Amino acid sequence: QVQLQESGPGLVKPSQTLSLTCTVSGGSISSGGYYWSWIRQHPGKGLEWIGYIYYSGSTYYNPSLKSRVTISVDTSKNQFSLKLSSVTAADTAVYYCARGRRNLDTAMVGGFDYWGQGTLVTVSS
Amino acid sequence: QSALTQPASVSGSPGQSITISCTGTSSDVGSYNLVSWYQQHPGKAPKLMIYEVSKRPSGVSNRFSGSKSGNTASLTISGLQAEDEADYYCCSYAGSSTYVVFGGGTKLTVL
């Protein structure tokens, strides 16, 4: 059974960089066939896709966040990470890591099948 | 404002069927069979219910089904049960510049 677990600071100061790591167990990031993803949910709001990375290192970002986002992968640790720079209060949200199923025909994500429990990150001084 | 449009709320009685719509455009829902649906209970992570328009992951009840017509995808829940009460989100691939878009979510109330 694949499991994902987010870790990182729950409080970040404005203008600083938010950094989170997702540790994957029960499966290898290097096995291919999946996109390793970050998705967030503002308090009481809907889901917002941040971006995802393939094990090879190819990255895909939400255009509205692209200038501030970096997603990286460490296959030796079976982890992938999110960095979001220049944060403001508007970045306060629950951040989820998730596994995206790679559709064989299009090579894009057909659904996110495993999710971490989510971690609340508050941006405040 | 979300890229995909869902009704804010739907309701139904136990045993009934309900359908939640998800309207996009020819750039996302209309162009790709990469629509997925998620169920989210309060304080919990979303759970994949349908992927690639109509496929059900292992372990998901066959009371849940998905379909698509044109730019609109739909999630149908038959034989409503109390535990189906939750928020539901649709999601679609949206091409090689936008990639992924979500709907704003629909709150399902089981009366």
Image (cartoon, coloured by chain):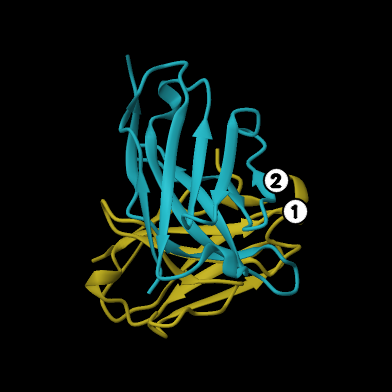
Using the rendered image, report if marks 2 and 1 lie on a common chain. Answer: yes
Residue, far front: A76
Chain coloured yellow: B
Q: Which mark is residue B98?
A: 2
Q: Is residue B61 above or below residue A114?
A: below
Name the residue tied to disc 1. Answer: B95
Q: Quadrant of the C terminus of chain B?
A: bottom left
Q: Quadrant of the N terminus of chain B?
A: top right
Q: Is residue B82 above or below residue A8?
A: below
Instruction: Identify the secondary structure beneath mark 2.
Output: helix
Residue nearest the observer in this picture, B111 or A20: A20
Chain coloured cyan: A
Crowdedness of circle 2 by 10 Å Cα count: few (<14), some, many (20+)?
A: some
Marks 2 and 1: CB-CB under 8 Å?
yes
Amino acid at dot 2: Thr
Residue at image location 62% in from the left, 68% down from the top: A32
- The answer to whether any part of residue B8 appears in the image is no
Q: Which mark is residue A123?
A: none
